[in-house]
Image (spheres, rainbow, N blue to C red):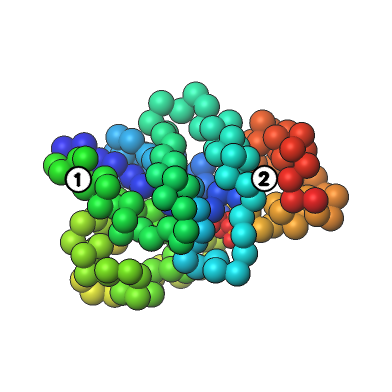
Amino acid sequence: MEKIGLFGGSFDPVHLGHLLVAQAACEEFGIDRLIFIPAARSPFKPDSAPANERHREQMLRLAMAGQPKFALDLQELSRGGTSYTIDTVRSYRSRHPKAQLFWLIGADHVATLDKWREASELAQQLEFLIIPRPGEAEVSPPKPFVAHQLRGFPLGVSSSQIRDRVARGLPIDHLTLPAVAESIRNNRLYI
Ligand code: ATP
């Protein structure tokens, strides 16, 4: 049975934490294809508009280059508006009725999974892989969600930290891939 990992986020910008999580999911759960799905607008970030879609897409493409298991899906950008997980999951379920689907989720969102749009339908459609954050305790999902803990590789990097460092003129070279850092500089993002 094919195992597909779905990794949604703002990716504004993509960083080493994201890439290490994707790699850990492939290694620990035998994921065959790991799909990065940039959100048009996250339901968790209603007040902040992310960087231009074209730039976020370009940075993801640079970060995923040469990784045969990684793929990019722009469906949430194409739909526009607030990006709801259930809409994306339905599209995968209809195209891959037999696949085992996993959704990668940050540990900080697990406790409120039952408040997500069409939560009980979501719980039926897939299982969750919980992304570890350094120093944080393991969390369990509310019923009836099924979730597994990822082990590697907790890294305390975030996109907001990168945006903040760029705005303050500080280097970001070791927080994301060199090609992504270069793209941020060339396109004058986050200044
Ligand atoms: P921001 O700082 O702007 O809130 P972010 O760095 O948390 O962004 P997102 O694109 O919003 O990045 O996150 C997408 C997914 O990646 C979320 O599930 C989030 O929990 C996870 N994630 C973000 N940073 C890390 C990290 N350092 N290690 C592991 N997972 C991460």
Give the mark toward the camera: 1 or 2: 1
Label 1: few (<14), some (14–19) or many (≥20) C-alpha neighbours in 10 Å: few
In the displayed structure, 64 sits above or below 4; it is above
Going by the numbered disc 1, the residue's amino acid type is Ser
Count of numbered tags: 2
User: Which residue is depicted at the point 37% across and 39% down?
Assistant: 34
Point out residue 122 in the picture as x, y percentages from the top left corner.
Answer: 25, 62
Label 2 SS = loop
Question: Of callouts 1 and 2, which one flags the residue occurring earlier in the amino acid sequence?
Answer: 1
Q: Is residue 169 left or right of residue 137?
A: right
Q: Determine which of the numbered discs, if any, sits on residue 94 in the image.
A: 1
Point out residue 67 in the picture as x, y percentages from the top left corner.
Answer: 46, 28
Label 2: few (<14), some (14–19) or many (≥20) C-alpha neighbours in 10 Å: many
Task: State which quadrant residue 31 falls in.
Answer: top left
User: Quadrant location of ligand 1?
Assistant: bottom right
User: Which residue is depicted at the point 36% across and 47% down?
Assistant: 6
Whether residue 105 is visible here, answered yes or no, is yes
Task: State which quadrant residue 165 falls in.
Answer: bottom right
Q: Is residue 161 left or right of residue 67?
A: right
Q: CA distance from mark 1 to mark 2?
A: 37 Å
Whether residue 101 is visible here, answered yes or no, is no
Label 1 SS = helix
Point out residue 119 in the picture as x, y percentages from the top left corner.
Answer: 27, 69
User: Which residue is depicted at the point 66% across and 36% down?
Assistant: 180
Task: State which quadrant residue 2 falls in.
Answer: top left
User: Which residue is depicted at the point 46% across and 61% down?
Assistant: 82
Residue that carries the numbered disc 2 in the rendered image: 175
Point out residue 150 in the picture as x, y percentages from the top left corner.
Answer: 39, 53
In this view of the protein, which residue sits in the foreground, 80 or 48? Answer: 80
Q: Is residue 126 left or right of residue 47?
A: left
